[in-house]
Image: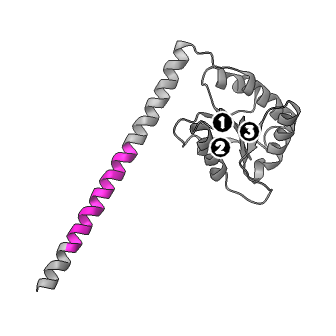
Amino acid sequence: MIALGSDHAGFELKHSIIKHLEEIKLEYKDFGCFSEESADYAEYAELVARAIVDGKFEQGILCCGTGVGISIAANKIRGIRAACCSDRFSAEATRLHNDANILCLGGRVVSPAKANELVDLFLDTKFSGEERHIRRIKQITELENKEYAKANEKNDETAESEKADDIKEEVTEEIKDEQ
């Protein structure tokens, strides 16, 4: 099953892709947005990306105006390899070499016919499994893990600092009460 999402600028293209998926009898779930009313792409990128990393879906397709913003947002989720593609070579290579799990498309960049072509290529292409590509994906995962660890370390330091400030405030109040 394919996870789908878009903002308002990718809404029309997403609906063209939905029709195509229905024609080729592929199941999907649309995570929104559900109209052409202004919507922020990060919200829908997160919904689709989390559904994939949670193992509920294997792959996703996201659409915004250019495909770039929604791909940046999706790639903030650990374990996501989202690729913005507007040509056949990139759509195939990102699966073959990068084992990308989300295809991002621009509603203002690619036509519905081109989008359907890229969707088919992306979904039909399997990861090559070649050692050099596995090694590179592991390097990407290591980068993610380093950033995740740094963020947690920073959060721990912030929490410790806030705790120290709270204790300092309590002690100061106790001293004032004693006087």
Neighbour class for label 1 at 10 Å: few (<14), some, many (≥20)?
some
Q: Which x, y percent locates residue 105?
A: 73, 38
Instruction: Give the mark, 2 or 1, whose residue is nearer the N terminus.
Output: 2
Q: What residue is rendered at 46% in x and 36% in y?
A: 144
Q: Which x, y percent locates residue 7?
A: 72, 51
State which quadrant residue 17 falls in. Answer: top right
Q: Which x, y percent locates residue 90?
A: 70, 26
Instruction: From the image, tell me which residue sits under label 1.
Output: 57
Q: What residue is rendered at 65% in x and 36% in y?
A: 57
**Screen quadrant of the N terminus:** top right
Instruction: Give the mark, 3 or 1, whose residue is nearer the N terminus.
Output: 1
Neighbour class for label 3 at 10 Å: few (<14), some, many (≥20)?
many
> Does the segment drawn in magenta span residue 154?
yes
Q: Are marks 2 and 1 in contact (CB under 8 Å)?
A: yes
What residue type is disc 3 on? Leu
State which quadrant residue 113 falls in. Answer: top right
Q: Which x, y percent locates residue 106?
A: 75, 41
Instruction: Give the mark, 2 or 3, whose residue is nearer the N terminus.
Output: 2
Q: What residue is rendered at 80% in x and 56% in y?
A: 35
- Magenta range: 150-170
Report the Cα–Cα distance between label 2 and label 1: 9 Å
**Screen quadrant of the C terminus:** bottom left
Instruction: From the image, tell me which residue sits under label 3.
Output: 105
Query: Which label lies toward us, 3 or 1?
Result: 1
Instruction: From the image, tell me which residue sits under label 2.
Output: 48
Position of 116 with respect to 2 (left or right) is right
